[in-house]
Each structure stands twice: as structure tokens, then as C-alpha cells.
Amino acid sequence: MNYVENIRRKIGHDPLILVGSNVIIEKDGKILLQKRSNGNWGLPGGLMEIGETLEHTAVREVYEESNLEISNLKLINLYSGNDYSFTLKNNDQINVVTALYYTNQFEGVMNTNNEETLDLKFVDPKELPFETEQEYVTYINDYIKKVEKFS
């Protein structure tokens, strides 16, 4: 049982502050999107486990969701507040604090052999699939604004 599942057993659906990381992985001007198990597109990433740093969370989650090993992460921004409060389909209430990273250094063969990923593809960040969740659209727009800084 992971940290969130353990806490949820104790507090039910009450609001919970969660911390996580997402990563924009860039290759030839395109970014990696993940089609998540809910059918929507987003960025690879997920929630921090006890003892992890935000950067380690990013590296672990990307590997779990894509089989890619990433390095040389650069922090783009931190996100928190009312815009990042959600009620999930199961009625769990969450307020998420997210670190958004960028990298163009990765290795490995992408695969979707896991519970969280239906598909992975590199796309033009200005031409996102219709089913991209708004949270990730915000992150990607911030990346577009800052991309020259990392080039």
C-alpha cells in the first residue's frame, strides 16, 4: 500500500494536500505526452512517496510510466493554490502542489506496459490533442513561454 492509500484509509474523502512532479521531455521540438488510463492526455509524472525529493519523484514516475530514464532536469515552475484543488471521481478531495521539470536528456525504449499508460507520443506543444487535461495545458503553456531559456 502506498502513502496516499494509507492516508485515505484514515481520512476518507476529506481534503488532502499531495505533492508531485511532472516532466516535459523534449525531442526535436516536440514534447512527450502520455495517454493516461482515464483516456485523457497529460504529462508523465505523479505523486511523491515518503523520503523522495521532487526530482527523484519525477525520475521514478517517468520510468514507471514510460520506461525512459531521464536526467539533467531543470525546474520550470511550482504550482499550488485553488486552481490545483480537485474532487476526483471517487469523491476524494485533493489540493496538489506540483513541480514541473524540463529535460531533453533521456534514454531507453518507450513502452506502455503498465497500468497508468495507454499510449505515449511526441507532439508539437502548440498542437495538443483535444483530450489534454487543462492542468497539463497550463504547464505546457508555461513551458512554451520559457523554452528559449533552456535552448
Image: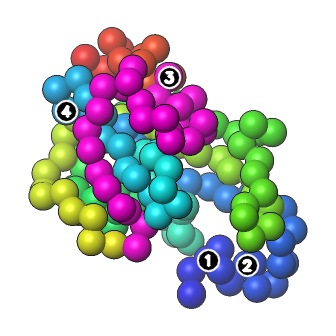
Q: Label 1 to label 2, Cα distance in Å?
A: 6 Å
Quadrant of the rendered structure where residue 138 is? top right
Quarter of the rendering occupied by the N terminus: bottom right
Task: Tell me whether the residue at label 2 lies in contact with that at label 4, contact meaning CB atoms closer than 8 angstroms.
Answer: no
What secondary structure is marked by label 3?
helix
Residue position marked by numbered label 1 in the rendering: 3
Q: Where is 127 relative to 37, above or below?
A: above
Q: CA distance from mark 1 to mark 3?
A: 31 Å
Of the numbered discs in the image, which one, if any, rests on residue 141? 3
* x, y percent for residue 6: 68, 83
Which is more N-terminal, label 3 or label 1? 1
Q: Position of residue 124 (x, y in %)?
A: 30, 26
Against 107, residue 127 (above or below) is above
Residue 7 circle label: 2
The answer to whether any part of residue 72 appears in the image is no
In magenta stretch: residue 123: yes
Q: Callout 4, which amino acid? A: Lys
Among the two numbered marks 2 and 3 on one chain, the one whose residue lies closer to the N terminus: 2
Q: In the rendered view, would you say 102 is above or below 6?
A: above
Dot 4 lies on which element? strand
Looking at the rendering, the stretch of residues picked out in magenta corresponds to: 115-141
